[in-house]
Image (cartoon, rainbow, N blue to C red):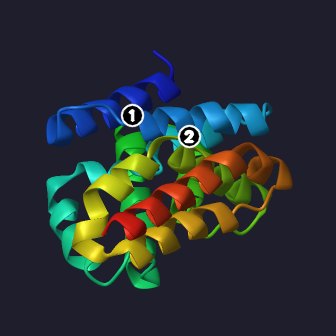
Amino acid sequence: MSLYKKTEKFVQESFLKTFRKKSKHSERTVFWLKKIYPQADEAMLIAAIAHDVERAFKENILDGIENRKKGFLDRKEMKRHQEKGAEIIAEFLAQQNADKKIIEKVKLLVSKHEFGGDEEQNILKDADSLSFLENNIDHFINNYIDEVGKKEVEDKITWMFERMTSEDAKEIAGSWYKDAIKKIEKVKADS
């Protein structure tokens, strides 16, 4: 079994154990990474499937719930999420006797997936945003508006769209973003 397949299995089993479902968002992040950057190497694919692995561990869920009260865009929480995920996946890869260069690259990519930086980090960030806008809009609108407020949810969705570096990625996601804003406006009008 390839290192990517082992990682995919680890990530999805982690989500199944915690949430009783696989992470469609992670799968679609890989899909979008391949679509916008066909030459992605194994380390990038591993980082794409594992970028949110931190969310699948119960000890991190409590931190996430507590930090969500500060808002989805709390930079300190997003930094913690990236760094903890990078540690988890690096430890897993080390247990698989992965090449140190792959481990370091994956760790760096996961540790930068929210804010980007260099070309590959920005590509991963864009693939993450595409998957979020494709798959997570209804979840955020239906589950978090009552908890954190419409403005917070709208700000998160807008940030996920605006943080994309690639104009091609923004073009792909444009209709999803516009539809999301319309849904939030409808919620505002109905309340």
Q: Quadrant of the C terminus?
A: bottom left
In front here: 80 or 188?
A: 188
Name the residue that disc number 2 marks: 29
Q: Residue at x 76, y 64 (%)?
A: 118
Label 2 Cα crowd, 10 Å radius (few <14 / some 14-19 / many 20+) = many
Residue 65 in the image: x percent, y percent?
21, 69
Secondary structure state at the residue bearing disc 1: loop
Q: Disc 1 versus disc 2: distance between alpha carbons?
A: 23 Å
Asked which quadrant contains residue 182, the reply is bottom right
* Res. 99 visible in picture: no
User: What amino acid is labelled 2 in the image?
Assistant: Thr
> Of tags 1 and 2, which is closer to the observer?
2
Residue at the top extreme, as displayed:
1
Residue 71 in the image: x percent, y percent?
36, 80
Above or below, comparing residue 131 to residue 1 in the picture: below
User: What amino acid is labelled 1 in the image?
Assistant: Gln
What number is the disc on residue 96?
Answer: 1
Q: Residue at x 40, y 44 (%)?
A: 94
Q: Residue at x 15, y 67 (%)?
A: 62
Asked which quadrant contains residue 45, the reply is top right
Above or below, comparing residue 121 to residue 40 in the picture: below
Left or right side of 130 for 70 = left
Mark 1 vs 2, N-terminal side: 2
Q: How many marks?
A: 2
In front here: 167 or 86?
A: 167
Residue 142 in the image: x percent, y percent?
30, 53
